Amino acid sequence: MTEKNDNVRVRFAPSPTGALHIGGGHTALFNWLWARHNNGRFILRIEDTDLVRSTKEYESTIMSGMVWLGLDWDEGPDIGGSCGPYRQSERLDIYRDYANRLVNDGKAYRDGEAIIFRVEPGQDISFRDIVYGQIDVMSDGLREKDSDKLKDIVIIKSDGMPTYNYAVVIDDHLMRITHVIRGEDHISNTPKQILLYRALGWDVPEFAHLPMILGRDKKKLSKRHGATSIYEYRDMGYMPDSMFNFLALLGWSAGDDREIFTRDEAAEWFELSRVTRKAAVFDFDKLNYINQEHLKALDPEVRLSMVRPFWVEAGLPVEEVEKSRGVKYLEDSLTLMAGRGRTAKEMSEFSDYFVSFEPVKSRWNAEGLDKDKLREFFAAVFASTEWKAPELEAIAREWIGQHEGAKMKDYAMPLRFALTGMKVSPGIFEVAELMGREECRKRLEFYGLL
Ligand code: GLU
């Protein structure tokens, strides 16, 4: 365990030019983990200098995506803070002032409206990345390959907007960022940023670049691999707790085989030094497994709140059932379902029969059954004084025992179909108990089995 450091200040700096994607959510999450682990501060900064592509809508989608994942920030454009403003478009004067300073110091020059930072050759701009280790770079590496001319760095473009590599340095310094945690695609930008820190006479923060996320085919994760926006996962019925858990495991592990954890546990255990540089593979089976485990562990009322919207979406009379049978009935139904269904959506599909008989009817028509025999059997079961699973099962077994050649499955299956319309369900006598005698009677009578 490394020492905790409550001076830690980290930031997530998205450009609001699209929704919150897996990569962005992953970066935000690792920053959040490091801040919370250290009781430090997590800052949200909006890098909206691309005025054409940036929108306020994307900014708020990104924020609500973070909220959905459970990543709260301590300073940001919406809540302010001591180092604001937190939108780059509102900091243009600051960028201009420091650029003028660099010009006055002879470290930058004007080229028309643009301001360009001079890269002096022969400087060692190597750095040690917390994740990737030593990265050796000479400023000559920033020379143009095909000529001897140095590749100086544009810091203010001719339209007056700062470039990314420049604004990020000004902001990370003024916002007192201690650790820059971001995707590995920014490793190549880091030496340029180090040159700017030095020219401005500022300390360089620590850098921790996060591994790339790949699809199962080992190619960079993209739309081809399926959903890439965080919201698409919400809409498929993945829970924020699971998504958080899953993203945390991309490039980091708790050090043993602890795979299912809460946000607080992850924050407690998180170490930047345990982040691996090996590209992380986005594995849907793992996500499904994690989601299933979280669904299983939920409090009944939370589980219901996860599944309920999908029942409603499927047109099931949820409100009616809540009124007539009570919320507890639905909670109990899902408790019985726990461990079935990898997503809340799947769970809603596997359990629709608790909410309504209609989907059952559409799935099963009781064709080809010997209804006389079944009627005898169900009459015996319904004679039970207690409507409890163990009693019902005992009566069923007794009846089977008394009838030559009768097999439990030949009777339990029609019962399962009549109640659920499905081949697979939780223990059918438990389902029957929970549904209640009257509902079961109704369903079996409909099929002529009682
Ligand atoms: N706006 C940059 C991005 O979204 C931020 C990179 C950084 O964290 O420095 O890639």
Image (cartoon, rainbow, N blue to C red):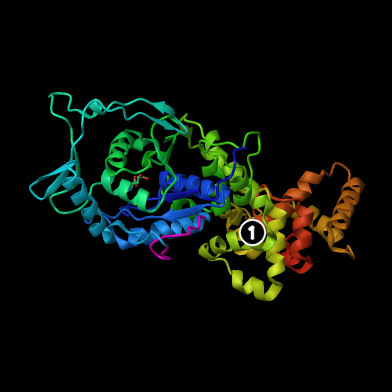
Q: Is residue 447 visible?
A: no
Q: Residue 398, image x and y in percent?
A: 91, 50
Residue at x-position 45% and y-position 56%:
65
The one nearer the camera, 102 or 25, is: 102
Residue on which disc 1 sits: 303
Residue furthest out toward the left: 112
Whether residue 46 is in magenta: the answer is: no
Q: Quadrant of the N terminus?
A: top right
Q: Magenta residues, as a range? A: 71-81
Q: Is residue 107 left or right of residue 84?
A: left
Q: Position of residue 272 (x, y in %)?
A: 52, 38
State left or right for residue 95 relative to residue 146: right
Disc 1 crowd rating (10 Å Cα; few below 14, some 14-19, many 20+) is many
CB at disc 1 and ligand 1 closer than 8 Å: no
Closest to the observer, 414 or 61: 61
Would you say residue 271 is visible in this rendering? yes
Q: Residue at x 42, y 35 (%)?
A: 212
Indicate the quadrant where residue 371 lies: bottom right
Q: Amino acid at mark 1?
A: Arg
> Which quadrant does the C terminus fall into?
bottom right
In the shown orientation, is residue 356 left or right of residue 184? right
Dominant secondary structure of the residues highlighted in magenta in the image: loop
In the depicted structure, whether residue 355 falls above or below residue 195:
below
Position above or below: 356 against 200: below
Snapshot quadrant of residue 378: bottom right
- Identify the residue shown where x is 43% and y is 66%: 79
